[in-house]
Structures are given as structure tokens and as C-alpha cells.
Image (cartoon, rainbow, N blue to C red):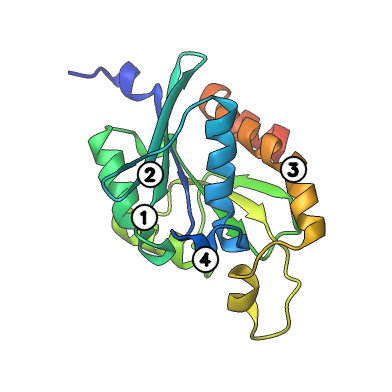
Amino acid sequence: MQTKEDVMKKFLIVGLGNIGDAYKNTRHNIGFKILDAVAAAHAVTFETEKLGDIASFGFKGKSFTLLKPSTYMNLSGKAVKYWMDKENIAIENILIVTDDVHIDFGTIRIKAKGTAGGHNGLRDIQEKLNTQEYSRFRFGVGANFARGRQVDFVLGEWDKEETSQLIERLPTSSNAITSFGTDGLANTMNIFNGK
């Protein structure tokens, strides 16, 4: 039987994205890309499991489970709920990593809760968990698209300049994720928001 203390040491980090090579380098898949950076930083690899690819590691006395759902973006909630229940992870120890067109490219915004903001992946998670009270890590992809072209933009690939800037943004994002588990949400927001 797990104690409350054991439960509070476990974290579920979910990167949102779409599976398949066609989506690999798209802006919408930044959640997958950031989780790949976290896994690389901690020398762990993903294994295909039920409803997603999973990697786990320990860091500073905390246990992190990384999840890249295989349900496609708009049905992410099913995978989040399954792994949250399976690993017995408290809602306050869940962090959803996603793209955001309302934030300048490369900017990080971590929040304790909020609306789906028009993001179908977040909307599905909210419905499956029956709450908006979960932490989210929004990575700005910018809004460099013409009216009515948002879908094409987020499903488009990073341009050369963005790709080169991602090289330094990804380690910062990885550090923010482990900070969420080790230093707490408030401290992580203070250190990384707007960075």
C-alpha cells in the first residue's frame, strides 16, 4: 500500500502531440519534442505501452513518468486518465506540455490551472479528468499565420530559424519540468515563466 508521502513523490509529465513521422517536426508536436529532451537529459528511452510511449526516471528523490499519448492530440485525455490511475499519481503532480499560438515563439508559460483556450488536446483532458485543476506548461509557437490558417501553421514544420533556436530552448524546457517535481509549481513559475 502506498502512503500519501509516496504518492506525492510521483509525477506524470504528459507531452501532447500526434504520432507518426508526418507530425514529428510540427509545431503541434512540441510536447513530444520537449519530453524527448527530458528523456535524453536523464538517459532514459521510451517504450511503447498502453495508450502511449512511456519513460521513467528518478531525480532528487522524486519519480517521473513521461507520457507521449498514442491516441492523437484530440483524444489525449484517455491516456492521461489511464496512466494517472495506473501509477496512482495525484492531480497536482500532473503537468501537461503543449504548444500555444497565443505566446511568442520559445516563451514558456507554466500555470496551475486554466481553460483549454481553444486547444482540443487540453479540452479532452479536462473532460476526462472532469477538472481544469491541473498544471500545464505552454510552449509558445507564435502566431505567424494568416487568418484562418492556424491549423496549417501548427501542423506545419519548424522553419530554419526556429529549429536553431529550439536547440537552446529545449534544455531550458527540460529543466523547468524537473523543477516542477523538485522545487514545486510556484518556484518553477517564478524561475521559468516568460523565459
Residue 143 is left or right of residue 112, and the answer is: right
Residues tagged 3 and 4 counted as in contact (Cβ below 8 A): no
Point 69% across, 47% down: residue: 108
C-alpha separation, residue under disc 3 versus residue under disc 2: 23 Å
Q: Secondary structure at mark 4?
A: helix
Is residue 64 in view?
Answer: no
C-alpha separation, residue under disc 2 versus residue under disc 4: 17 Å
Q: Residues within 10 Å of mark 1 (few under 14, many from 20)?
A: many
Q: Secondary structure at mark 3?
A: helix
Is residue 99 in view?
Answer: yes
C-alpha separation, residue under disc 3 versus residue under disc 1: 25 Å
Where residue 11 appears, x then y in whole percent?
Answer: 42, 31
Q: Is residue 94 above or below residue 25?
A: above
Where residue 38 appears, x then y in whole percent?
Answer: 56, 34
Residues tagged 4 and 1 counted as in contact (Cβ below 8 A): no
What residue is pinned by disc 3? 167
Q: Residues within 10 Å of mark 3 (few under 14, many from 20)?
A: few
Q: Please, which residue is most extreme toward the left here?
A: 1
Q: Amino acid at mark 4?
A: Ala
The disc placed on residue 140 is: none
What residue is pinned by disc 1? 70
Point 70% across, 61% down: residue: 158
Mark 4 vs mark 1: in front: 4
